[in-house]
Amino acid sequence: MLAYAPRGVSAFGLSAVSNIFADRSRMGLPRLDFAVCADQTGTLSTDLGMCMHVEHGPEAMANADLIIVLPTDHRPLSLPAPSNKAITHAYHRGAIIAAYCTGSFLLAETGLLDGLRATTNRHLSAHLAQRHPAITVDTEALYVDEGQVVTGAGAAAGIDMCLHLLRREHGAAVSHAVAREGMVAPRRESGQTQYVPRPSQADTSSHADNEDTRLADLLVRARTHLHRPMKVNDLAKQALMSSRTFARRFRAVTGTTPHAWLTDQRLDLAEELLATTTLSIQKIAGKVGFHSNGILRTQFIKRHGISPSAYRQGQRALASPKGP
């Protein structure tokens, strides 16, 4: 894995990405090789004015299977020709290219986002859409996965994007383990909004605080009882809210609907069980609250494009020891 650090690279972004893709083979996780490249070797200044030594130039992209274009505070947002060419060549030989925040602007310079959906920092979305009209800019998503090209929103959304890439390529068990060690949320779905709506005057009351406390407790209980049927109206009653208030508070806290949130939690657990147990597909479907193999299969294919059985086989292949 290679991080491309442009001039004025975000120190936070560099730190976050290097931490997520650090080698954790000592923990039994897949070995990841992480390196940084820049437009040229030598000293590179970050957005905080700190200097770092970079050993690799754009030529290092020739061997990378994943390249992440990091954000920068440097202006103008332009990609030098050698780096542009290296990223484009890496894409055409099959490498995954990802970028987030202002890094999405640099990736857009290659033309690889033309005709695709992409995202960036919410406050920069209009500028990206104006500058690159061939791109469909999603102003709400935390990250957008277009297969070989993935883009993320601003700051913390870069962490979500990287964990998504880990989960996609190595499975939920790996991404959850990395998230736990880094003490970050293991999964925020790409459809979640980039911001939390500003509370109204009523929301700032102690009554709203009590509602959010009850909702938080309900989410914890729901995660530990996914095997049980859960109807939205029943959940609203457990939270002591009307269905309308429950739906509004739920979206404000999670960024999505109760049904979508439950589906995501169930799929997350199914991924972990497929990767770490020998339980049958039927038993896994029951344990996560999908009451038939068919429902689990349908939802799994929507997320991954493959069946649960194929996903399990892929996870076993990743976990198998490799020869010299």
Image (cartoon, rainbow, N blue to C red):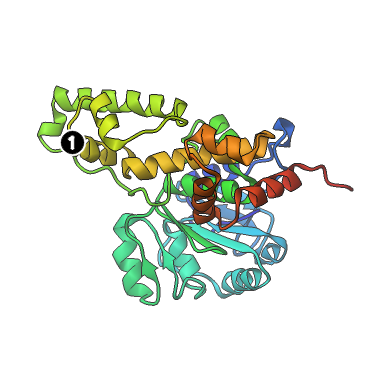
Mark 1 closeness class: few <14, some 14–19, many ≥20 residues within 10 Å: few
Residue 44 in percent (x, y) is at 57, 54
Q: Disc 1 marks which residue?
A: 245
Position of 218 with respect to 283 (left or right) is left
**Residue farthest to the right?**
324
User: Considering only vertical position in the picture, is 59 above or below 220?
Assistant: below
Residue 285 in percent (x, y) is at 54, 39
Q: Residue at x 25, y 34 (%)?
A: 233
User: Considering only vertical position in the picture, is 97 above or below 50?
Assistant: below
Residue 176 in percent (x, y) is at 56, 36
Q: Residue at x 71, y 42 (%)?
A: 30
Residue 177 in percent (x, y) is at 60, 34
Out of 224 and 147, give the one closest to the viewer: 224
Mark 1: secondary structure: helix
Out of 133 and 4, give the one closest to the viewer: 133
- Asked if one can make out residue 33 in the rendered structure from this viewpoint, the answer is no
Q: How many marks?
A: 1
Instruction: Please name the amino acid that badge 1 sits on.
Output: Thr
- Asked if one can make out residue 113 in the rendered structure from this viewpoint, the answer is yes
Position of 166 with respect to 146 (left or right) is right
User: Considering only vertical position in the picture, is 2 above or below 108?
Assistant: above
User: Considering only vertical position in the picture, is 198 above or below 92?
Assistant: above
Out of 130 and 213, give the one closest to the viewer: 213
**Residue farthest to the left?**
201
Toward which corner of the image does residue 174 lie, by quadrant?
Answer: top right
